[in-house]
């Protein structure tokens, strides 16, 4: 089983309940086990700032899925929970990003690991440092 770290966020509907639901759905997947989760933090929007504040958290998972297959599970979970992509960085009912998968560095047309913007986003790093400080430090060091 591989370790991976996810960033989850929501800012419309009932964000905290939606984060809990996303964690429940991920943990119920036969190839994913949620092993750690951070506290939920409230953050200002990033990129597009004229929208409600976000509830954000991080989760550590064990999985036997390959990174691209894990991405598909995350995207399917978002769709099943009602996410519709209207605009980049816009409001959302749920967002699930793969921040890191083991210590793999990869870049494809669909997935870049570690997440290319994680090192610059406190709403990702603060919860990640709570549950996986070494991983957060590795991501920051890669960007230096």
Image (cartoon, grey):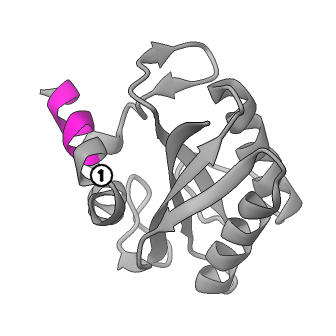
Task: Quadrant for the C terminus, please.
Answer: top left
**Side (left or right) of 42 relative to 67:** left
Q: Is residue 129 magenta?
A: no
Task: Quadrant for the N terminus, please.
Answer: top right
Residue range corresponding to the magenta coloring? 136-143
116 in relation to 127, above or below: above
The residue at the point 41 percent across, 78 percent down is 39
**Is residue 91 in sight in this rendering?**
yes
Q: Position of residue 2 (x, y in %)?
A: 56, 35
Q: Which residue is mark 1?
A: 121
118 in relation to 20, above or below: above
Q: Main secondary structure of the magenta part?
A: helix
Q: Nearer the viewer, residue 108 or 33?
A: 33
The residue at the point 24 percent across, 53 percent down is 133
Please identify the residue farthest to the front as the structure is shown. Answer: 1
Q: Secondary structure at mark 1?
A: loop
Q: Position of residue 7 (x, y in %)?
A: 49, 55
């Amino acid at each position: 089983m591989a370790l991976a770290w996810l960033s989850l966020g929501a800012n419309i509907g009932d964000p905290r309940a939606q984060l809990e639901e996303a964690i429940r759905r991920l943990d119920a997947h036969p190839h994913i086990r949620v092993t750690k989760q951070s506290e939920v933090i409230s953050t200002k929007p990033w990129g597009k700032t004229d929208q409600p504040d976000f509830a954000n958290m991080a989760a550590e998972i064990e999985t036997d899925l390959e990174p691209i297959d894990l991405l598909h599970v995350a995207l399917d979970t978002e769709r099943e929970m009602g996410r519709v992509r209207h605009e980049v960085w816009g409001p959302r009912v749920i967002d699930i990003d793969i921040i890191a998968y083991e210590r793999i560095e990869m870049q494809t047309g669909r997935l870049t690991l570690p997440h290319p913007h994680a090192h610059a986003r406190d709403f990702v790093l603060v919860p990640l440092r709570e549950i996986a400080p070494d991983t957060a430090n590795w991501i920051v060091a890669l960007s230096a």
